Image (spheres, rainbow, N blue to C red):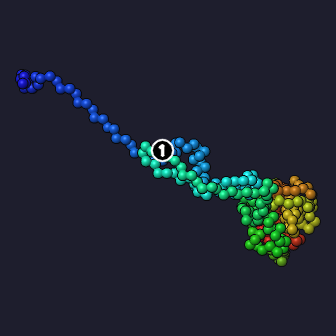
Amino acid sequence: MTTQHTRGRRRAAGPPQAPRAAEEFTAERPRDPQREARRRRGAFRQVTDFAAASGIGQKAGIALAATGLALTVAVPVTGPVMADQQPGQSVSAVTAAPQPEVSAEAGARIDFSRSSVVTQGDPDGKLKQLLSAQSAGSITRAASAGSLGAPLATLVTASPFGFRISPITGGSGDFHRGQDYVAQCGTSVLAAASGTVTFVGWHQYGGGNRVVVDHGNGLETTYNHLSSASVSVGQTVTRGQVVALSGTTGASTGCHLHFEVQVNGEVVDPTGWL
């Protein structure tokens, strides 16, 4: 039964209806079957499992045993195999077979060829290997290239090695014994490689103030026309160490560095070693 109002609206005469109950959604999100197994394993166990599965553990074990740091090392062959897990089931690991052992004596030594591990980060190692294998006189240009470091921070050639017109006399046929590099007076001059200083002083044949460094097996480098030297005879120097300051002493027409490479006392083109 309804009641009619003056504006034409109808209203139910019976009791109001109860509000509808909200529907509940109980669908569960799918779960990762291995999640619980990973949670139960500690962080250390997870790392060791990964190392075993990837082969890292085996390599590390062999290396430690060979160096004597670990005398007996268990080497995993395969990683642990996890059983398939279904929702609501527990997870257990399959028991691995007995693992082989790698052993080494406490005083074991590892011998290796230095040349196989030399990189650009160890240029003195390359030069030492090169010189110890043979005398400097029998080394090819291809083998020597890059074995010496630059004697200046920036190399700009002013006059190359070989025959040229003399800048002092103007005559032709002048043999230039090294490479001239542009350098303002007072520029730091660097040792091209590690070695021992064998001469510091005046070079009477035009070199002016001169420093000579012996690198062994017949290889020497010389630095000429210097304004001053910062090393002494008998001193050991390292690659890149400042040995002097550039100048224009001796037979020089201006500030620069005259750099020589000598093999068994004979000069060679420095560019074959730089």
Q: Secondary structure at mark 1?
A: loop
| Quarter the N terminus occupies | top left
Residue 258 lies left or right of residue 198; in this view the side is: left
Give the residue type at disc 1: Ser
* Residue in the foreground of this view, choosing between 131 and 52: 52
Pointer 1: what residue?
90
Q: Relative to 70, is 223 above or below?
A: below
| Quarter the C terminus occupies | bottom right
Position of residue 155 measured from the top left corner of the image (x, y, whole percent) = 74, 62
**Would you call the spot at circle 1 few (<14 residues within 10 Å), some (14-19), or many (20 or more)?**
few
Q: Report the residue at 83% width, 59% height from top.
A: 194
Position of residue 223 measured from the top left corner of the image (x, y, whole percent) = 85, 62
Q: Relative to 199, is 170 above or below?
A: below
* Residue in the foreground of this view, choosing between 69 and 90: 90
Asked if residue 87 shows in the view, the reply is yes
Position of residue 64 measured from the top left corner of the image (x, y, whole percent) = 72, 54
